[in-house]
Image: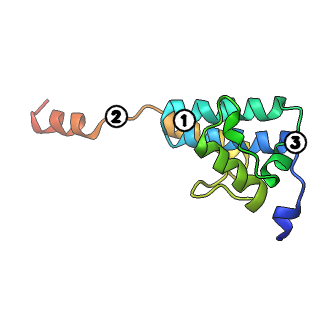
Amino acid sequence: MTKTAARAHTNAQIARQLTLIARDLRAKNENPFKVRAYYRAAELVARQPSSIAEQVRANTDLTRYTGIGPSIAQTLREIVLAGERGQLELPLAPAASGRREAEESAPRRPRRASSRRQSSGR
């Protein structure tokens, strides 16, 4: 067993990881329903009276909770058992994530429109 797997995870810590995943997905302009699903799962985990980490270690089917599907259940297993989230990278800090979101959501002028204007002589 690795140090990460042996480390205790509180529901609040797990919920924080899910929130970071949701923010990262939103910053990458992923499907809004997927983003919302991660936010909802974070809320559910934070409100859960029993330990999600203990349920993961007991191999409990987490999809029994409304709002946790197979993908999020797998993410929860990775958070608890491996300390990682598969292909996604966690933002280094919430401020960095917010800055990246602001940069990515800034309006951009389409290149085609500007090249058309130049080629039409306007």
Q: Is residue 40 above or below residue 94?
A: above
* Residue lying farthest to the left in this orientation: 120
Residue in the image at 65% along x and 36% along y: 68
Q: Secondary structure at mark 3?
A: loop
Q: Which residue is mark 1?
A: 34
Q: Which mark is residue 109?
A: 2
Q: Are marks 3 and 2 in contact (CB under 8 Å)?
A: no
Q: For the residue marked with disc 2, what is the amino acid? A: Arg
Q: Residues within 10 Å of mark 3 (few under 14, many from 20)?
A: some
Q: Which residue is mark 3?
A: 51
Q: Which mark is residue 1?
A: none
Percent x, y for residue 33? Answer: 52, 30
Q: Nearer the viewer, residue 84 or 24?
A: 84
Q: Residues within 10 Å of mark 2 (few under 14, many from 20)?
A: few
Task: Quarter of the image for the N terminus: give it.
Answer: bottom right
Residue in the image at 82% along x and 63% along y: 5
Percent x, y for residue 120? Answer: 9, 33
**Residue 26 shown left or right of residue 14 in the figure:** left
Mark 1 or mark 2, earlier in chain? 1
Residue in the image at 76% along x and 52% along y: 59
